[in-house]
């Protein structure tokens, strides 16, 4: 899962470094269709019992993205995104008890709290510097986190029913690509968009697909709260990439957040 987190942070950092990050992100989501369809050609389709969960996951993900976009309009990405990512493991851990009967040990529960607190601290530190996020924006981010947690639970159910990550994950990515293409086609020319971001659209999906495949495989072998929490450690790699490659400043609060998340990883492994 740390490998999945690193890959996730890598393609997100690449997107962030582009002159038009929003367009680059859309290009990665749509571009994920090509490696996904290639994988489906070899692995075949997953069990039909998982298709309803695939449809639910894709359908739930769309309003989560819309709400996150609303949060971005109310304040900085650097504030809204960590809040979403920080609340997600906590929401999943709480929901996994009634949904899957997965109760974490005290040490693992403390690990989830540390990861969530560390990521949320990154958002708080950004809010403290920028002072641009409104209470309405915070509400949008919190609601997006709740919906994202619901999508993660549907994803978990579908992956476990399918029991084949190489068939399940590509079908989800293809569905997301189709949904994003339909949504974006109403706003601009898709060929022009993909042509502007052809490097990201071609190579970014390789990283995103590999990251997602690992996460789906992990859901077959570990409790969902542990998997989601470890995947959110991509924020650690994002901080490192930002400091080393993008020359972003890392202050004492951010180092404290990194320490919290690292302690969470150790506790999740205990």
Image (tube, rainbow, N blue to C red):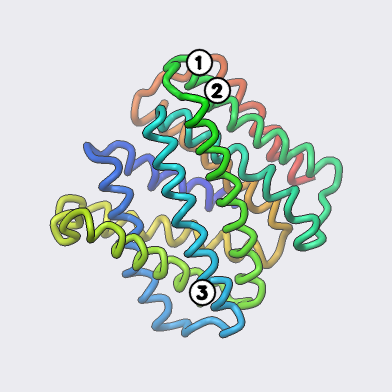
Rate crowding at label 1 as few (under 14), some (14 to 19) or many (20 or more) other CA atoms within 10 Å.
Answer: few
Residue beneath disc 1? 128
Q: Earlier in the sequence, mark 1 or mark 3?
A: 1
Per the rendering, the mark at residue 175 is none
Determine whether label 1 and label 2 are within 8 Å by CB: yes
Residue beneath disc 2? 124
Q: Is residue 63 above or below residue 107?
A: below
Provide the secondary structure element on which disc 2 rests.
Answer: helix
Residue 220 picture quarter:
bottom right
Q: For the residues marked 1 and 2, what is the alpha-carbon distance in whole angstroms?
A: 6 Å
Q: Earlier in the sequence, mark 2 or mark 3?
A: 2
Residue in the picture at 54% in, 67% down: 56
Looking at the image, which is closer to me, 9 or 93? 93
Q: Position of residue 11 (x, y in %)?
A: 38, 47
Q: Quadrant of the C terminus?
A: top right
Looking at the image, which is closer to me, 150 or 210? 150
Q: For the residues marked 2 and 3, what is the alpha-carbon distance in whole angstroms?
A: 38 Å
Does residue 186 show up?
Answer: yes
Provide the secondary structure element on which disc 3 rests.
Answer: helix
Residue beneath disc 3? 166
Q: Position of residue 228 (x, y in %)?
A: 63, 50
Residue in the picture at 36% in, 75% down: 37
């Amino acid at each position: 899962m740390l490998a999945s987190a690193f890959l996730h942070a890598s393609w997100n950092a690449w997107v962030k470094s582009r002159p038009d990050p929003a367009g680059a992100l859309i290009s990665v989501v749509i571009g994920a269709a090509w490696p996904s369809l290639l994988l489906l050609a070899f692995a075949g389709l997953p069990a039909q019992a998982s298709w309803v969960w695939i449809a639910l996951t894709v359908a739930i993900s769309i309003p989560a993205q819309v709400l996150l976009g609303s949060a971005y309009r109310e304040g900085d990405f650097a504030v809204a995104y960590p809040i979403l990512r920080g609340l997600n493991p906590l929401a999943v851990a709480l929901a996994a008890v009634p949904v899957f009967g997965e109760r974490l040990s005290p040490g693992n529960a403390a690990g989830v709290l540390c990861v969530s607190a560390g990521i949320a601290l990154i958002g708080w530190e950004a809010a403290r510097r920028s002072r641009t996020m409104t209470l309405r924006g915070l509400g949008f981010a919190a609601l997006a986190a709740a919906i994202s947690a619901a999508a993660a639970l549907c994803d978990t159910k579908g992956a476990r029913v399918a029991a084949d990550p190489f068939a399940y994950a590509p079908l989800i990515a293809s569905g997301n690509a189709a949904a994003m293409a339909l949504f974006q086609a109403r706003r601009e020319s898709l060929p022009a968009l993909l042509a502007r971001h052809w490097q990201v659209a071609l190579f970014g999906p390789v990283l995103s697909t590999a990251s997602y495949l690992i996460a789906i495989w992990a859901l077959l072998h570990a409790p969902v709260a542990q998997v989601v929490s470890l995947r959110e450690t991509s924020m650690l790699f994002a901080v490192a990439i930002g400091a080393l490659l993008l020359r972003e400043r890392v202050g004492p609060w951010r180092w404290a957040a990194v320490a919290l998340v690292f302690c969470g990883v150790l506790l999740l492994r205990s």
